[in-house]
Amino acid sequence: MNPYDDSAAFWAIFAALLGFGLLIGLIVYVVGSLFLMKLFDKAGVQGRWRAWVPVYNYMVFFKLGDLSPWLVLYALGGAIVLGAIPGVNFLSSLVGLAFHVAAAVAAYRIGLKLGKDPVWVVLFVLVEIVWLGILAYDRSRWNPNVPPAQWAGNAFLGDTTVWEGVPAQTSTVPAAGGYGQAGYGQPYGQQAGYGQSAQTGYPAQPGQPGYPAQPGYGQQPGYGQPAQPGYPAQPGYPAQPAAAVPPAAPYTPPPAADPFAPSADAPATDPSTDPSTQAPSRRDEEQPPAGPVPPAPPQP
């Protein structure tokens, strides 16, 4: 048998297998990109082209899963460099395994935002393309209000990048021992006066140390007092007009007392019987005045 014929047959079989593998890879890539495109649409990613760019599409996938997108480049670069160094090329397999673990973690977070149970990540590990197809075309809706991941504050694992067209993810770790989480506007501090620190922005009232003043309890505008700074008046409560006050009557002093008026304590007299108030009659005016009265004779 001619060795040349054996070599030609080998390369023919190798080329056929390679072509078949490339065809299968191309089909998987196209289908996976379609699934990623639908998944990105659910998450609100702008630009469907992001799902078709190799490597970059997985960077967006990691970002949606609350992981740093640069981990994809770290894993790719590490696998290439370690694979080219003799003696340590086995480490490239470990880097590839770490990449798949990180991808499973990102899939776990994406599943939570689509309302899936954590057990769905097992399907991602076993058959990734099936997991993508189910989440891409089912009726689940993206929920951006999922609590942040425990590693969100980590400088290496957490997502701190901002890309235009990709929604920002929750990336703040809840405060340890507190009641407030990031995204809720303000922490729930504890009042001073009970052995703990006072809330920020609540100054204590003078004369009462340890008991901070609680702002926001002033009367609404329209009830006689202006609104406190930072607390605008609620709509629907217009200021009430002040009631009209009638003008005060001018002061009139009491009349002066008549000195000749009879006292209130004096007994009342009848004017018809009072001789001082009767006018003299005409007969009395015509009679002559009486003469002197002679003295009485002495008695024996």
Image: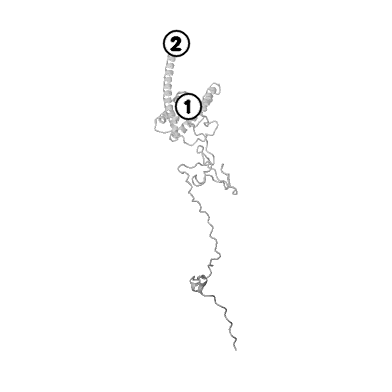
Q: Is residue 30 above or below residue 170?
A: above
Q: Is residue 170 above or below residue 213?
A: above
Disc number placed over residue 100 in the picture, else none = none
Assign a secondary structure to mark 1: helix
Characterize the local packing of mark 2: few (<14), some (14-19) or many (20 or more) Cα atoms within 10 angstroms: few
Picture coordinates of residue 109, whole percent (x, y)? 47, 33
Assign a secondary structure to mark 2: helix
Q: Is residue 116 left or right of residue 192?
A: left
Q: Is residue 130 above or below residue 291?
A: above
From the image, which quarter does the C terminus lie in?
bottom right
State whether residue 90 appears in this view.
no
Picture coordinates of residue 164, whole percent (x, y)? 49, 28
Disc number placed over residue 58 in the picture, else none = 1
Q: Residue at label 2?
A: 4
Picture coordinates of residue 54, whole percent (x, y)? 47, 23
Residue nearest the observer in this picture, 233 or 12: 233
Residue nearest the observer in this picture, 152 or 8: 152
Q: Amino acid at mark 2?
A: Tyr
Residue nearest the observer in this picture, 104 or 182: 182
Q: Is residue 289 above or below residue 64?
A: below
From the image, which quarter does the N terminus lie in?
top left
Characterize the local packing of mark 1: few (<14), some (14-19) or many (20 or more) Cα atoms within 10 angstroms: many
How far apart marks 2 and 1 lie (CA) works out to 45 Å
Q: Amino acid at mark 1?
A: Tyr
